[in-house]
Image: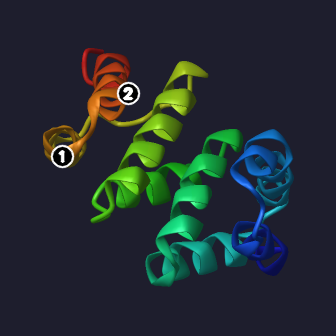
Amino acid sequence: MYEKYAHYLNSGFSDDYWSDFGMFEAADCLSTFTHVDWDRLAQEVSTQSTGWVERCAQTLSDVEAPQAVSILLMLLSNSNKDVVEAAADSLNALASYGHHIAATEELKNKLTAAKATAGVLGRLVIESLEKRVLSK
């Protein structure tokens, strides 16, 4: 299933098609991931293009799996602010659905660093995530 998921992320979908259809088709693949698929995604996500990684982060909010949270937490340290903001947005969505995200010191540090480089919208997303997770 990983190959099919990776194919969706690599597809040259327009941004409109991606947000209307492609993202949900890719997320459907995640719902049938095995442990092997999750391990492969965790290993390969850092070797992919920025656009691929950003799309990956966008889809991970649509699956309730601890592996998704782990990957999103890892992506908070990405050098690309769009990837970081997509990861924060997906974590925020998961938290809003009631998914537990541990309020660790590492998370606090990553969010502080992410806020320093984020744009206005990114800061709002990160602040919302901080309120959901860190204020509990």
Crowd around label 1: few <14 · some 14–19 · many ≥20 (10 Å): some
Res. 117 mark = 1
Quarter of the image where one finds residue 77: bottom left
> Residue 121 placed where, x, y %?
36, 28
**Relative to 86, residue 103 above or below:** above
Q: Which element type, helix, strand or loop, lies under badge 2?
A: helix
The residue under the point 52% across, 80% down is: 48
Compare residues 11 and 37 and report the one nearer the observer. Answer: 11
Quarter of the image where one finds residue 104: top left
Q: Which element type, helix, strand or loop, lies under badge 1?
A: helix
Numbered label tally: 2
Crowd around label 2: few <14 · some 14–19 · many ≥20 (10 Å): many
- In the image, taking residue 48 as reference, residue 117 lies left or right, namely left
Q: Which residue is mark 2?
A: 125
- In the image, taking residue 90 as reference, residue 83 lies left or right, namely left
> Residue 60 placed where, x, y %?
62, 49
The residue under the point 31% across, 30% down is: 126
**Relative to 113, residue 51 above or below:** below
Type of amino acid under label 1: Thr
The residue under the point 79% across, 81% down is: 3
Type of amino acid under label 2: Val
- In the image, taking residue 83 as reference, residue 62 lies left or right, namely right
> Residue 70 placed where, x, y %?
46, 56
**Relative to 46, residue 97 above or below:** above
Quarter of the picture containing the N terminus is bottom right
> Residue 19 placed where, x, y %?
73, 42
Cα–Cα gap, marks 1 and 2: 13 Å
Res. 30 mark = none
Name which of mark 1 and mark 2 comes first in the sequence.
Answer: 1
Quarter of the picture containing the C terminus is top left
**Relative to 35, residue 118 above or below:** above
Q: Nearer the viewer, mark 1 or mark 2?
A: 1
